[in-house]
Image: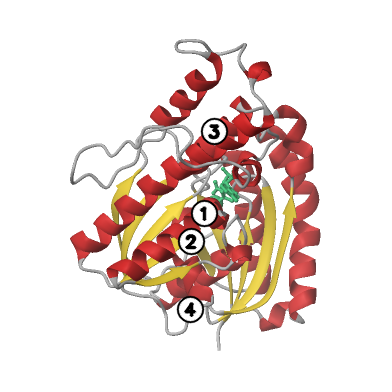
Amino acid sequence: MTTLLGIETSCDETAAAVVVDGRRVLSNVVASQIDLHRKYGGVVPEIASRAHIERLDGVILEALDVAGCSPGDVDAVAVTHTPGLVGSLLIGVTAAKTLAWAWGKPLVPVHHIRAHALSPAIDADPPPWPAVALIASGGHTSLFHVRDPNDVTLLGATTDDAAGEAFDKVATILGLPYPGGPHVERAARAGDPAAVAFPRTMLGRDSLDFSFSGVKTAVLYHVHGYGRTSGGLDRLSETDVADIAASFQQAVVDVLVGKTLKAADATSADTVTLGGGVAANTCLRQHLEAACAAAGLRFCAAAMPYCTDNAAMIAAAGFYALAGGVTAGLDLDATAS
Ligand code: KG4
Ligand code: ZN
């Protein structure tokens, strides 16, 4: 039995969790900073760093307390060290180094996106590997071939806006609050996904890369008029906003589903996994699940608490890294990308 404390501070969630053997989540504490950033319409890096400093100690103590663990029960400390906001990452990395040193335990560096890729395994029995893993988050849209947790190959990635970033920008265009994804999804529920024919950018027949800046710009021009960036929002009814949200969401989902199925075909994988903040989107979960069923593929999505940023996925990914012999010294760097 191997118990890891995971620490996550790469963006605007301060999180700590205790997980046994990469699967049994004893605690998963997330302190969201949404209220601090909302009035700015996005994450302000300096505010995020300060909030991590103020909250991280309490979040770690709560994670240990809820798990019923003392430091002696923890076998290793896993921490997100890349990618993310460097000032925010630094807070988590410094805390993890301090605890690893003080407790005399190994320090395990975790790549945030790899952790999203492994997050569907927390609840999957048997483990979902080998698989094609789709990660759709605020900063990244990626397809990985996960042969096992320590043998992961990047198949394709975002060339401009990530899927979550497109949701957030479209929310701003439609006058919806930050963070945009859940608000666009909510607005879309009352809309017609076929109302507006937004583009599905595929980047070539065999490409597994993604581009969502075109669909975002198409929404912008649909709202304001071609070539214009303001003045159109007031003319839209609530139904218009719902139709645009639903049509945009469907365009993004169609691209994500289409490319993921293409990746499964290219790798002959028989399992597809889904993780990252946008994996919380019900439309995406349902369409990918249906497409996998139609293609005879097993589908395994991260459970809702492990979609948006959390530390359970960091502790889980850390477990597999540790098993593969990956540890870091006290000179571990926080790096933005
Ligand atoms: O993985 P995550 O928590 O942070 C990053 O690693 O970036 O992803 C956050 C992103 C944001 O862009 C947010 O708007 C999006 O995930 N998101 C959603 C939903 N919930 C969160 N996008 C669409 N529908 C949702 N329900
Ligand atoms: Zn993330």
Residue under pointer 3:
244
| Mark 1 C-beta closer than 8 Å to ligand 1 | yes
Query: Is residue 111 in sight in this rendering?
Result: no
User: What's under tag 2, amino acid-wise?
Assistant: Gln
Quadrant location of the C terminus? Answer: top left
Quadrant location of the N terminus? Answer: bottom right
Residue under pointer 2:
286
Q: Quadrant of residue 236?
A: top right
The label on residue 283 is 1
Image vertical order of residue 136 relative to residue 273, above or below:
above
Disc nearer the start of the sequence (1/3):
3
**Under tag 4, what secondary structure?**
loop
Query: Is residue 325 in sight in this rendering?
Result: yes
Residue under pointer 4:
124
Q: In this rendering, which labeled residue sits more in front, label 4 or label 3?
A: 3
User: What's under tag 4, amino acid-wise?
Assistant: Ala
Alpha carbon of mark 4 to alpha carbon of mark 1: how far? 21 Å
Q: Residue at x 33, y 58 (%)?
A: 144
Coordinates of residue 45 in the picture (x, y in percent) = 65, 34
- Disc 1 and disc 2 in contact, CB within 8 angstroms: yes
Disc nearer the start of the sequence (3/2):
3
Q: Between 298 and 36, which is closer to the camera in this rendering?
A: 298
The label on residue 9 is none
Alpha carbon of mark 1 to alpha carbon of mark 3: how far? 15 Å
Alpha carbon of mark 3 to alpha carbon of mark 2: how far? 20 Å
**Under tag 3, what secondary structure?**
helix
Which class describes the residues within 10 Å of circle 3: few (<14), some (14-19), or many (20+)?
many
Alpha carbon of mark 4 to alpha carbon of mark 3: how far? 35 Å
